[in-house]
Amino acid sequence: MNLPKLNHMMSNAIDAAALIAMGKTFRNEKERKFISKVIPALKEDSKRRDALETEGIHIPPFIITGISAQCNLRCSGCYSRAFDACGDSDSPKSNEMSADEWKNIFSQADDLGISIILLAGGEPMIRKDILKTAAEFPQIIFPVFTNGTLLDDEMIRFFDDNRNLIPVLSIEGKREETNLRRGGGVYEKIEAAAEKMKAAGILFGASITLTNRNIQTATDVEFVGNLESKGYSLVFFVEYVPAQSGSETLVLTDFDREFQGKQMKTLRSKFKNIIFMAFPDDEKYLDGCLAAGRGFFYINASGGAEPCPFSPYSDVNLKDHTLLEALESPLFRKLREDGILEQEHHGGGCILFENKDAVSRFIQLK
C-alpha cells in the first residue's frame, strides 16, 4: 500500500472514531464541546498531512511517547522494565526530558498535522508537569495510558477540565487476572477511579494486554458489555510481546489470533458506542506494521526516536533533532525501504520484535 493511500485510510479511521465519541458523549456538555471542536481540527490536520505528502514528506497521524521512565508498579512481563526503559518511582533517571522539551515536540507535531499523541511510560501520571503541558494543546488528542493507581480526586478533576487528555486504564481482564499481573488491590483502585470518571461524564478507556491466558475472557461479549456499563468508551487490545525472558509461554497462538479476529468483528458489530483498536491485529488491514513513521513512531523518555515501543533502537534524539529529522532518520528509512514492515506473512505478533536482530544490524550499518 502506498503511503498517501495509507494516510487516507488512517485519517478516515480517526474521523470515524471521533464520530462514535460524539454520539457517546451527546448528553455531556463538556465532552460534546470538546468533540465538536476536535472534529474540524482533525480534518485540518489531515489536509496538512496531505499537503506535505505532495511534497514527498510523509507524516504519520499519531505518535506514541513514553514520557516517564518511572513506575510505581512492578507488573510481571513488563516490556519497559525488560528493555531497561523504566525504573521505580523513587529512582528517576537523570536523562528524562523536561516539560519544556516535550512542549517543543508537541508544538512541532501540531505544525505537522499530527492529530494524536499517546502518552505512556513508565507511569505517565508521575509526570504531572508534562500532562499539564499537554493540556496547553487542546487541538491534539492525548490518550494517557495509566495503571490507574494514581488517579485521585485531584487528577480526575484535571481530566474533567482538560478533555483532550483521555485516561486509558490498563487492565488484564477481571479482578483475578489484573491483580495477578499488576499486584493486589490494583483492580479495586481502577474500579473506584472508573466509577468517579463515569459520574463526571469523562471519556475514558481500557487497555488490555492479550495473552493466551486471558484472551477468551478479555474479548468475551459479556466482559466487554460490563466495561460498557461501567462507562468505558474505548478499548485497546494489545498483543503481549515476550520482552521478558521466560514469558514466551504467554504469547498468542495462531488459533488465538484467528479467534481474536473473529471476536473483534463481533464486538464492533455489537457495541456501536465503543471505539475498539487492536494492535497489531488491525495492521493486517493496512498492509503491514505501522512503525518507523509509516503510521506512527515512538519517542522514549530520554528523547530517543524508536520504531515502536517494542523495538528499542534509536539513531536520532529529539533533544537535538526535529520531528522531521527523526522521521527521515537512517534507521526509519531503512526499515520502510527494506520491506520488513510489509512482509506478506505478517498475520500476527510484533514483526519488529520478531526481527530484532535485523533491526539491530540496521543500526550498526548506519
Image (cartoon, rainbow, N blue to C red):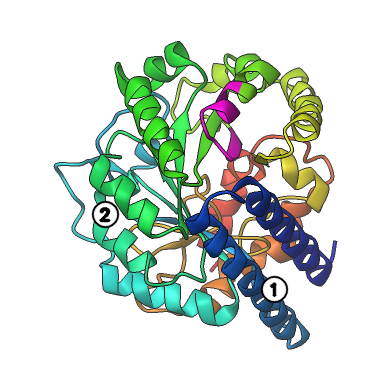
Q: What amino acid type is highlighted by mark number 1?
A: Lys
Q: Is residue 149 above or below residue 33?
A: above
Q: Picture quarter containing residue 40?
A: bottom right
The vertical placement of 304 against 73, above or below, is below
Q: Is residue 314 visible?
A: yes
Secondary structure under the numbered disc 1 in the rendered image: helix
**Left or right: where 80 falls relative to 286:** left
x then y, percent, for residue 259: 77, 21
- Other-residue count near label 2 (Cα within 10 Å), few / some / many at <14 / 14–19 / ≥20: some
Please tell me which residue is depicted at 69% across the width and 49% down the height of the picture: 20
- In the image, the segment drawn in magenta is 226-238
In this view, 49 is above or below 20: below
- Residue 187: where, in percent of width, then height? 38, 21
Task: Inspect the magenta stretch and tell me whether residue 290 lies in it.
Answer: no
Relative side of 119 to 283, left or right: left
**Residue on which the image places disc 2:** 127
Looking at the rendered structure, the kind of residue marked 2 is: Arg
**Total tally of numbered discs in the picture:** 2
Residue 9, numbered circle:
none
Q: Nearer the viewer, residue 355 or 79?
A: 79
